[in-house]
Image (cartoon, grey):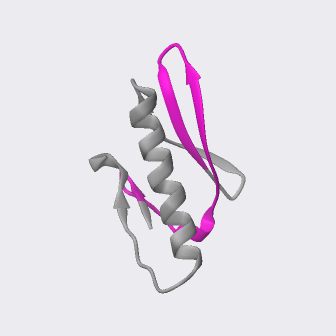
Amino acid sequence: MLKIGSNEIAWANISEVTMFADDSGIEVSITVEETVLVVGNYASADHATSVKNVIEASRVASAFGGVVITIDIDSL
């Protein structure tokens, strides 16, 4: 499960993880049931890429069963 603030999202409900760069930084977002939720806005591309990679890896690992992964995004 991915925790963002008080929201808890099951890995199976995340259909996509994306990054978007603009003047304010690099935004990482997820798509859940056709709704885009912003995970965070990061100053460096390295930090944003790390957060995106952790979410993607956890999502894939949980899809193969037997793996329980909980990430509190506020602590990354």
Measured along the vertical axis of the image, is residue 43 above or below residue 75?
above
In the picture, measured across the screen, residue 53 lies left or right of residue 70, that is: right
**Residue 63 part of the magenta-drawn span:** no
Dividing the picture into quadrants, the one containing residue 54 is bottom left
Residue furthest left in the image: 75
Measured along the vertical axis of the image, is residue 48 above or below residue 65?
above
Residue furthest front in the image: 46
Q: Residue at x 49, y 50 (%)?
A: 53
Figure disc tally: 0
Q: Which residues are magenta?
A: 3-30
Q: Residue at x 44, y 80 (%)?
A: 67
Residue 37: image location, x then y, percent: 56, 45
**Residue 16 part of the magenta-drawn span:** yes
Residue 65: image location, x then y, percent: 53, 84
Residue 13: image location, x then y, percent: 61, 66
Q: Residue at x 37, y 67 (%)?
A: 70
| Image quadrant containing the N terminus | bottom left
Q: Residue at x 66, y 49 (%)?
A: 35
In the picture, measured across the screen, residue 5 lies left or right of residue 28, that is: left
Dividing the picture into quadrants, the one containing residue 69 is bottom left
Dividing the picture into quadrants, the one containing residue 36 is top right
Q: Nearer the viewer, residue 45 or 29?
A: 45
In the picture, measured across the screen, residue 51 lies left or right of residue 60, that is: left
Residue furthest right in the image: 34
Residue furthest bottom in the image: 66
Measured along the vertical axis of the image, is residue 35 above or below residue 9?
above
Residue 57: image location, x then y, percent: 50, 60
Magenta residues, dominant SS class: strand
